[in-house]
Image (spheres, helix red, strand yellow):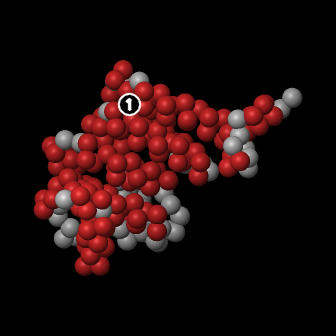
């Protein structure tokens, strides 16, 4: 009997089109997501690094469901270990070899940006300040990327950084259009509405 036949019991309608390998990977990632949510205090920095590396690896050439579950697991991990997660995500948030004209989403970079959006308000000001120059250099490039998903993720990270750093966030490297876009999302953000 094929190993994939037993997976049909676990397959939701959205996963029916996935290969057996991807179905197993998705089930495994759901378990990892729950584990890092409910047993976070027992993880050492080295373990956090291995988990982040493994989750980022899962985002390469994977269906949406797997990428989404891996990103949710990263967000769960970052909510319990923000400093360690931030340090482990920084190597993925780099512009090395970034082709702004490529319409494809760079998977690790996009997942890192989406996770950073949920993470920046949990990181200490010192760690954020030390990483900010390299991050702003990255954002100047990714805000102009041909992929709309990368541009959106960049703007959302900048909006969250605005609420953490306030006037300390220097958007001078961005065009007027991009600064207005960030300002517009800041004005519409629920954190702004509550103030």
Q: Which residue lies furthest to the right in this view?
A: 1
Q: How many labels does the image show?
A: 1
Q: Residue furthest front?
A: 194
Q: Position of residue 84 (x, y in %)?
A: 30, 34
Q: Residue furthest bottom?
A: 176
User: Within 10 angstroms of label 1, few (less than 14), some, or many (20 or more) residues?
Assistant: many
Q: Where is residue 189 in the image (x, y as percent from the top left)?
A: 30, 62
* Residue 90 in sight: no
Point out the image quarter for the N terminus. top right
Side of 31 where 45 appears, left or right: left
Tell me: residue 31, above or below residue 188. Answer: above
Secondary structure category for the residue under label 1:
helix
Q: Tell me which residue sits at (34%, 23%) in the image.
A: 41
Side of 152 where 66 appears, left or right: right
Q: Tell me which residue sits at (43%, 40%) in the image.
A: 74
Q: Where is residue 181 in the image (x, y as percent from the top left)?
A: 31, 73
* Residue 148 in sight: yes
Q: Tell me which residue sits at (21%, 67%) in the image.
A: 171
Point out the image quarter for the C terminus. bottom left
Closer to the camera in the image, 96 or 173: 173
Q: Tell me which residue sits at (69%, 43%) in the image.
A: 12
Side of 181 where 98 appears, left or right: right
State the image quarter where residue 125 is shown: top left
From the image, tell me which residue sits under label 1: 48
Q: Where is residue 20 in the image (x, y as percent from the top left)?
A: 73, 39
């Amino acid at each position: 009997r094929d190993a994939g036949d037993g997976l049909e019991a676990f397959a939701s309608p959205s996963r029916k089109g996935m290969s057996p390998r991807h179905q197993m990977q998705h089930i495994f990632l759901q378990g990892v997501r729950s584990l890092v949510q409910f047993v976070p205090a027992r993880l050492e920095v080295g373990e956090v690094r291995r988990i982040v590396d493994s989750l980022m690896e899962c985002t390469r050439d994977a269906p949406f469901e797997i990428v989404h579950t891996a990103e949710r697991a990263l967000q769960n991990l970052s909510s319990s270990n923000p400093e360690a997660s931030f340090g482990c995500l920084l190597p993925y948030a780099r512009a090395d070899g970034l082709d702004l004209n490529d319409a494809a989403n760079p998977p690790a970079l996009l997942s890192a940006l989406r996770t950073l959006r949920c993470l920046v308000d949990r990181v200490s000001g010192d760690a954020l300040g030390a990483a900010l120059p390299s991050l702003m250099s990255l954002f100047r490039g990714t805000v102009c990327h041909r992929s709309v998903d990368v541009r959106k993720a960049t703007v959302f990270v900048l909006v969250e950084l605005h609420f953490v750093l306030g006037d300390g966030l220097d958007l001078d490297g961005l065009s007027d259009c991009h600064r207005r876009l960030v300002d517009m999302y800041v004005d519409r953000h629920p954190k702004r509405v509550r103030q």
